[in-house]
């Protein structure tokens, strides 16, 4: 293969056991994302998007099936190995931005670099670059409450990119934004993914955001729906 997948899911199934019975959140879903590709996972509320993204990001373990990062099996890793992967190779972007309220934009972006003990000068340079990438350099010293929703999500994107990951996972990153702002955030994500050769998985329930996708995975009741030439597997 000339261009192997950066991230793949093979027959991913997740069954939650609850007091009122088993919940089949995801059933035998397979997908592949190559470097420089944006896969959009689409489906109504409750269709299994968050469950799938949590499995792909190593935040949850499948009942059966496998997740692979390139040629390494994520689902076979120990907790310390997973932690290392989440700090260096894979980043998450959250619907609710996940920013620390008492920290400035720049300090929020710096958090992942502090976790891997990046030297101070290097940290400053990389934080400035990441903020610049998302167009937020002029707002570096503002706290989240002094920023609009779209600007806060740009901080979330800068924080995800500052560790220079190979893989980006974003669970409904535009879910709390108005539709015009959502479109600009999807444009930014798509530009960054293509320019930087990232493999990205982004979920949304908004059909208007599909035009930025290189591949689409449509979920219904935890199962992948066939979509012809754009299908993800
Ligand atoms: N921790 C859990 N325990 C039990 N059921 C869950 C849990 N997480 C998700 N589910 C169920 O799995 C299904 C898929 O949920 P989810 O992945 O959150 O969908 P989406 O993100 O598309 O809205 C839903 O029926 C949800 O109620
Ligand atoms: Mg969800």
Image: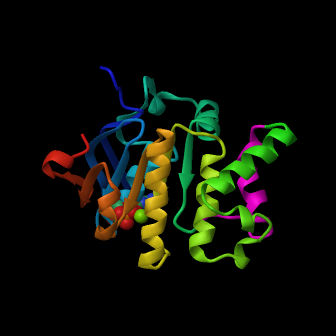
**113 in relation to 170, above or below:** above
**154 in relation to 27, above or below:** below
* Residue at 80%, 39% in the rendered image: 122
| Residue 207 point in image, percent of width and height | 28, 68
- Magenta-tinted stretch: 97-116
* Residue at 26%, 48% in the rendered image: 27
Left or right side of 163 for 17:
left
Residue 106 shown in magenta: yes
Quadrant of the rendered image holding ligand 2: bottom left
| Residue 45 point in image, percent of width and height | 34, 70
Q: Residue 174: tell me if it is visible.
A: no
**118 in relation to 223, above or below:** above
Q: Residue furthest right?
A: 120
| Residue 144 point in image, percent of width and height | 71, 72
* Residue at 49%, 76% in the rendered image: 177
Left or right side of 11 for 172:
right
Q: Residue 137: tell me if it is visible.
A: yes
Image quadrant assignment for residue 20: bottom left
């Amino acid at each position: 293969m000339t261009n192997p997948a950066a991230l793949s899911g093979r027959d991913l199934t997740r069954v939650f056991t609850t007091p009122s019975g088993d919940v089949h959140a995801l059933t035998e879903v397979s997908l592949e994302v190559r470097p420089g590709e944006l896969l959009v996972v689409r489906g109504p509320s409750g269709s299994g998007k968050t469950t799938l993204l949590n499995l792909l990001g190593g935040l949850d373990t499948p009942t059966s099936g496998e997740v692979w990062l390139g040629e390494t099996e994520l689902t076979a890793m120990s907790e310390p190995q997973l932690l290392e992967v989440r700090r260096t190779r894979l980043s998450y972007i959250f619907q609710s931005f996940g920013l620390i309220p008492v920290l400035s934009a720049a300090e929020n972006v710096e958090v992942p670099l502090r976790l891997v003990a990046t030297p101070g000068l290097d940290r400053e340079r990389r934080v400035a670059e990441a903020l610049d990438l998302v167009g937020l350099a002029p707002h570096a010293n503002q706290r989240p409450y002094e920023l609009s929703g779209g600007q806060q999500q740009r901080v979330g994107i800068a924080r995800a990119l500052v560790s220079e990951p190979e893989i980006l996972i974003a669970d409904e990153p535009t879910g709390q934004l108005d539709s015009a702002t959502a479109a600009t955030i999807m444009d930014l994500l798509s530009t960054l993914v293509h320019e930087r050769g990232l493999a990205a998985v982004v979920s949304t329930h908004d059909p208007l955001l599909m035009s930025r996708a290189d591949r689409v995975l449509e979920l219904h009741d935890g199962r992948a729906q066939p979509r012809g030439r754009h299908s993800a597997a």
